[in-house]
Amino acid sequence: MMTEEERTLVDLVDKVNQLDTAAVLYSSGTTGRVKGVMLSHRNFTSLAAGIYGSQLKNRGLGTSDVVVLSTVPLFHVYGLVCILKAAAMGETLVVINQERRFEVGRLMKIVEDYKVTNLAVAPPVILAMCKGPRMDHVHDMKSLTTVVCGGAPLLVEVISRFRDRYPNLVVAQAYGLTETTGGVFRTLGAEESRRIGSTGRLSSNMQAKIVDPETGAALPPCKQGELWVKEAAIMKGYVGEEKATLTTLDTDGWLKTGDLCYIDNEGYLYVIDRLKELIKYKGYQVAPAELEELLQSHPDVLDAAVIPYPNEEAGHVPMAFLVKRPHSSIDEPQVMDFIAKQVSPYKKIRKVKFIDCIPRNAPGKILRKELIKLALSSRTTNTKTAAKL
């Protein structure tokens, strides 16, 4: 016989349904406050079904011989999706120890030891593999076929350098948010991955459209606008943030991603930048990602980030934070001249600051709010000094 307490527990278990919250993950908070994202059992079921369908189409039936090495944190939606995908597809999943300092050599030793076929990484790992010594001369990497990159934008310049160095590896990309339970667009196979700059085609069980950010009107292919997505994988909402939820999800269930994108005539997605991160210069819109890609193409620049810097006349001007190569003598005028030769006048870099490292979160996204604080603190200090003089 069950006790009253046991019956109560059983009743509670029986009442769990697909719309109940299964997990609360946290948004990256790169431009604003971190928010708790409520994901339901239905969200995860939809995601697993989409992965299963697309992977079967790509690989065919049969027992999976895929061995995935995940370098991404498990508290991030990317890491959680790696676990879910391994369970849905019967893959072997190897998880790297996050507590140890990252080294490309150690990563490739794991690839060799476990005969890893797929590597799940964020952009900083791709960048490290481009700039360090070639590892395929030291370790046996013949099992490795695909490097999947997500969590943050991967610059075209970095992709090209990686492919030049490792021509036999497929670089697959994906686009998704915590709010979409992971991937919305993804590249599948070598053919789709050749579209450099694209994050692939729409995933199974998803809908997407590009809209005018001001009017919400749907736009045709190849027109830039805000990406909106819809389907069963979309979050329930933000924990304790009803206003933010209503702002992000419209009454028809469309999620406003806040990303400026376009979809070409063949259905490939191209991400331009975050709408919130666009720099408004005298009425013109400047995408930091475009300038960062140009800056990283300079041989003396290891890493770069661009932010809006307040200006009385223009509103904001592009300011670059750079990490330069050791012993490099590159200076502010050289950087400004390098960019000025390649962009329209309104996109020119107007200020430059050299720092030791670009602040990023675990998946590799630039923490622009930290750089804006640093820039504004320097501005305040300079203003006080000028006042004393």
Image (cartoon, rainbow, N blue to C red):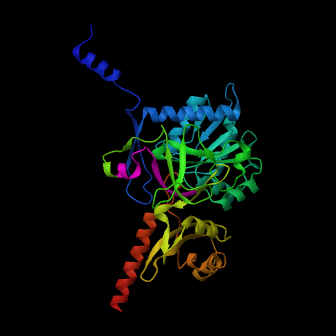
Q: Which residue is drawn at 63% across and 46% down?
A: 201
Q: Quadrant of the N terminus?
A: top left
x, y percentage for residue 133? 71, 56
How many numbered tags mark residues here? Answer: 0
Q: Is residue 337 above or below residue 285?
A: below
x, y percentage for residue 36? 37, 46
On the question of residue 103 being in view, the answer is yes
Image-quadrant location for residue 305? bottom right
Q: In this view, does 282 lie above or below 144?
A: below
Q: Quadrant of the C terminus?
A: bottom left
In magenta, the rendered stretch is 244-261
Left or right, residue 375 beside residue 104: left
Q: Which of 103 and 382 is in front in this view?
A: 382
Left or right, residue 234 beside residue 267: left
x, y percentage for residue 229? 50, 47
Q: Which residue is drawn at 76% across and 41% down?
A: 142
On the question of residue 241 being in view, the answer is no
Q: Is residue 365 above or below residue 99?
A: below
Q: Is residue 260 magenta?
A: yes
